[in-house]
Image (cartoon, rainbow, N blue to C red):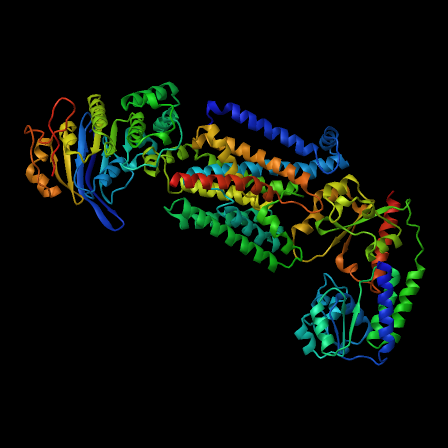
């Protein structure tokens, strides 16, 4: 799955992620000495620096990496599986469905009963959205896919807004944006614990489809003739759907729906990985992590009195890429 | 009990019976041509032989084992399938696309063998010069050869090809059939769906004539390509040109005979 | 500016009260949480024709249980006029249409500003009592409040005082010019929120809070439903940075209005300061 030709790209992306990770631990609202804070953290001292780095910046950075990686990978896998470069969990309503599921669990207080319920709600919402999407699209082409995705994501956003307006908390109605656009602010290590297992499991499941995605580039029948089972319990479809739902559901449950990461990152990296679906996966995960860390740094830099949602920034980067693809498609058709 | 054989295969698609108790065999070293009018069930028969479509009744046997009971990976190494339609190729390099044909052998991790197989497939299909080009930039005929190269790179004992020459000019069509001939000489079994009866008569060792989901006739080309059979199955009258064994002939540069089916 | 407005309100209330008949009203409608709670303490329940629905909500009202024995009224023009009140009291900034409609229907309408200092609480009690035609009952509450307030030692509040910050959902803090700020000062604290720069005009991020922690963190929560905004108040970083003596949790209902009960809240703040001083 990892091609020798991609080693330099992977090394550069990994170095970028590592650098941004250190930066996001070292830099924030208030000046904190990172080495001193880490020393206190290791020694278990509750110094201000240790609390700021260990309990505010660290969970945020970990979630930036894990969620960015999951979204980037999910975009690459969905694009490979659907053979459509416009597939993206955010654009197709999968994240929106997950946000709806998470919102229903969080604001009703169910999340307080068990830590598993919040990601489970996200997973259920994401799974429902993917299944609806596949059912709606069937053998339809790009246009049908995008129409179904647009309908699904706005429907999920509307339901989310309605659900939050009906919730007892007076603040809930103001938090719609956090779920629809996404945010990493004020997350805790508990959130990391909630989201990480599902994210990792979903990503590993999606990675098992790497070679099948290569074969699928030539068509369903060729893939099947080359020994890849497409349907069934351990079929490629099941692994893609369940993997994406588990990963996106676990991410969105703590961060809200951050869009466009899965669209932008594979789009930028595809020419660098020879347009081969399997070679795109790992770089997309790293690229997604890098993009989200950069976007989060920008959020912290730009946010003044009120917070800018991280999804706003990824959309600002992502929408032009989307436009570019649409124009390219139109040229291809005419 | 070597060979690939369908025995009494019956198959329905969407409530319509597409194959009716079809029995067909391919032995190592022979090219079997599947001919018949559109909608006769040729492609479905090939898919059933490839194990992609499971028969409702009847069995497909591969070298003495039931195909349906085989692990997909095992099957994929023994049977290479070239479907009639494929996705337009992605903008990957031709060489990398052909290398996808080695996916069934991924567990062996024998890179030298994979590279050699890809090079052979590129050579057989005349794509060596185009190996670095993006697949999306190929012409229709080049794409057809690319798809064939991918199927050849599997280097499976049996090759099932559904209309591999439909998009090719005569020269390339001849070249493809000639490479099937070399496969057969090397001991491989080839089943190929053809609409070009001249090529079928000239290169296939045996022909299977399909009509309405049934095997209407099978045997040596001279036995199948008779005026009566053509009239009965295709509903056309044919005019013979040239010799009697291969009634319709295609020029390959040496002869001036013309293909006439009217 | 604020001072002028306050004087104006009190004057207005006094003028209106003076002009009004001194006999008690029997169909009073209140459309404001603070006047709701004052009325419940000033007039018998049977004289109240309707209170705002918030009054029954224990998250916002310290008189929620008593409020449930009187009718709640939707703060809409139609509902208010249909209740045929002989007095409508409300705040200046909410339910504007309903109050306007009541006035146009010829009903007496009295408006009250939010109280911004402890010292203004007696004036408001008196003004509401006068409007309701129960000045004696008002005077009794006012005298009790004044007596209790006078008993507190006047604190210096200066730079030597411990600092405190009221931290609410979304990182909102309370600054000078509010009842809560006045209470902090009366309890002997310095309001740390007043020293913050303009970047934190609305909310203070957890990180900024932790980087310059006040001696006492007063966590103000609404206790209604679940929200991300409230979840911030339970962030483990806050628990670690502000151990028991440095943290006081006070629900919203204890601050929202200037009431006789406001002094109970002041007691809690003073107790927290004493605990803080002994823990040093």
Residue B80's spot in the image, x, y percent?
A: 28, 30
Q: Is residue A310 visible in the rendered structure shown here?
A: yes
Residue C34's spot in the image, x, y percent?
A: 78, 66
Check the image and report above or below for A198 versus A166: above
Q: Nearer the viewer, residue A272 or B45?
A: A272
Q: With B120 as the anchor, is C89 left or right in this view?
A: right
Q: Nearer the viewer, residue C1 or A263?
A: C1
Quarter of the image that includes the N terminus of chain A: top left
Check the image and report above or below for B85 versus C11: above
Q: With B132 as the anchor, is C54 left or right in this view?
A: right
Q: With B143 as the anchor, is C192 left or right in this view?
A: right
User: For residue B164, what is the image quadrant?
Assistant: top left
How many badges with numbers are in the image?
0
Check the image and report above or below for C127 versus B192: below
Q: Is residue A85 visible in the rendered structure shown here?
A: no
Residue C2's spot in the image, x, y percent?
A: 84, 59
> In percent of the image, x 24 and y 45: which residue is there?
B56
Residue C41's spot in the image, x, y percent?
A: 81, 71
Quarter of the image that includes the C terminus of chain A: top left
Q: With C141 as the anchor, is B213 left or right in this view?
A: left
User: For residue A158, what is the image quadrant?
Assistant: bottom right
Q: Nearer the viewer, residue C208 or B1?
A: C208
């Amino acid at each position: 799955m990892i091609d020798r030709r991609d080693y330099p790209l992977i090394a550069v992306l990994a170095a970028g992620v590592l650098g941004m990770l250190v930066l996001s631990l070292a830099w924030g609202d208030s000046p904190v000495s990172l080495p001193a804070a880490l020393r206190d953290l290791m020694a278990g001292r509750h110094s201000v620096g240790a609390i700021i780095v260990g309990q505010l910046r660290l969970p945020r950075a970990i979630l930036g990496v894990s969620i960015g990686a999951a979204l980037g990978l999910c975009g690459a896998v969905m694009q490979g599986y659907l053979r459509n470069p416009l597939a993206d969990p955010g654009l197709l309503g999968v994240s929106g469905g997950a946000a709806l599921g998470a919102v229903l669990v969080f604001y009703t207080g169910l999340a307080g009963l068990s830590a598993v319920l919040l990601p489970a709600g996200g997973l259920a919402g994401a799974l429902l959205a993917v299944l609806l999407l596949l059912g709606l699209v069937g053998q339809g082409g790009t246009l049908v896919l995008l129409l179904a995705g647009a309908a699904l994501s706005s429907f999920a956003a509307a339901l989310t807004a309605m659900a939050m307006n009906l919730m007892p908390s007076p603040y809930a109605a103001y938090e719609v944006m956090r779920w629809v656009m996404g945010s990493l602010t004020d997350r805790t290590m508990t959130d990391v614990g909630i989201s990480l297992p599902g994210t990792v499991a979903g990503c590993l499941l999606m990675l098992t489809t790497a070679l099948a995605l290569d074969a699928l580039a030539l068509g369903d029948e060729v893939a099947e003739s080359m020994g890849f089972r497409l349907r069934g319990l351990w079929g490629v479809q099941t692994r893609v759907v369940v993997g994406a739902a588990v990963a996106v559901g676990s991410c969105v449950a703590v961060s809200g729906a951050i869009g466009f990461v899965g669209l932008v990152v594979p789009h930028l990296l595809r020419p660098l990985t020879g347009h081969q679906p399997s070679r795109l996966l790992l770089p997309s995960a790293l690229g997604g992590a890098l993009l989200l860390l950069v976007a989060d740094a920008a959020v912290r830099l730009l946010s003044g009195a009120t917070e800018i949602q991280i999804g706003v920034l990824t959309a600002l980067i992502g929408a032009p890429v989307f436009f570019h693809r649409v124009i390219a498609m139109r040229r291809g058709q005419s | 009990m070597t060979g690939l054989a369908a025995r009494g295969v019956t198959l329905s698609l969407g409530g319509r019976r597409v194959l009716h108790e079809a029995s067909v065999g391919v032995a190592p070293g022979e090219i079997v041509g599947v001919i018949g009018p559109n909608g006769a069930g040729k492609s479905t028969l090939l898919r059933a032989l490839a194990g992609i479509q499971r028969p409702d009744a009847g069995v497909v046997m591969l070298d003495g084992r039931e195909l349906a009971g085989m692990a997909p990976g095992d099957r994929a190494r023994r049977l290479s399938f070239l479907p009639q339609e494929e996705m337009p190729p992605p903008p990957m390099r031709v060489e990398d696309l052909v290398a996808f044909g080695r996916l069934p052998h991924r567990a062996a991790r024998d890179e030298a063998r994979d590279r050699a197989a890809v090079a052979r497939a590129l050579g057989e299909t005349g794509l060596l010069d185009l190996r670095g080009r993006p697949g999306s930039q190929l012409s229709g005929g080049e794409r057809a050869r690319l798809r064939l190269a991918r199927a050849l790179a599997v280097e499976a004992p049996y090759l099932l090809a559904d209309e591999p020459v439909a998009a090719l000019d005569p020269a390339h069509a001849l070249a493809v059939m000639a490479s099937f001939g070399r496969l057969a000489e090397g001991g491989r079994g080839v089943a190929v769906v053809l609409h070009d009866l001249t090529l079928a008569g000239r290169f296939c060792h045996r022909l299977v004539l399909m009509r309405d989901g049934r095997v209407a006739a099978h045997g040596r080309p001279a036995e199948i390509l008779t005026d009566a059979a053509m009239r009965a199955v295709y509903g056309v009258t044919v005019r013979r040109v040239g010799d009697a064994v291969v009634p319709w002939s295609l020029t390959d540069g040496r002869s001036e005979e013309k293909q006439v089916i009217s | 500016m604020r001072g002028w407005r306050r004087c104006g309100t009190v004057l207005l209330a006094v003028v209106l009260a003076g002009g009004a008949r001194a006999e008690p009203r029997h169909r009073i409608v209140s459309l404001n949480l603070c006047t709701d709670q004052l009325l419940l303490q000033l007039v018998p329940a049977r004289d109240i024709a309707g209170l705002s629905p918030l009054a029954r909500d224990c998250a916002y009202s310290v008189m929620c249980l008593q409020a449930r024995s009187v009718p709640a009224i939707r703060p809409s023009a139609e509902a208010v006029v249909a209740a045929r009140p002989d007095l409508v009291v409300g705040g200046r900034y909410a339910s504007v249409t309903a109050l306007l409609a009541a006035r146009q229907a010829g009903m007496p309408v009295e408006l009250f500003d939010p109280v911004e200092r402890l010292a203004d609480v007696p004036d408001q009690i008196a003004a509401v009592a006068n409007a309701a035609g129960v000045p004696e009952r008002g005077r009794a509450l006012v005298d009790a409040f004044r007596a209790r307030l006078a008993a507190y030692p006047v604190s210096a509040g200066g730079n030597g005082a411990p600092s405190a910050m009221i931290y609410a959902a979304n990182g909102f803090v309370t600054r000078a010019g509010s009842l809560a700020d006045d209470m902090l000062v009366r309890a002997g604290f310095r309001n740390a929120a007043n020293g913050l720069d303009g970047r934190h005009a609305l909310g203070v991020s957890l990180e900024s809070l932790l980087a310059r922690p006040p001696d006492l963190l007063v966590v103000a929560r609404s206790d209604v439903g679940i929200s991300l905004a409230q979840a911030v108040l339970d962030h483990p970083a806050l628990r670690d940075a502000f151990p028991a003596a440095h943290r006081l949790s006070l629900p919203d209902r204890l601050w929202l209005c200037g009431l006789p009960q406001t002094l109970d809240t002041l007691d809690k703040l003073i107790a927290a300061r004493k605990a803080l001083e002994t823990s040093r």
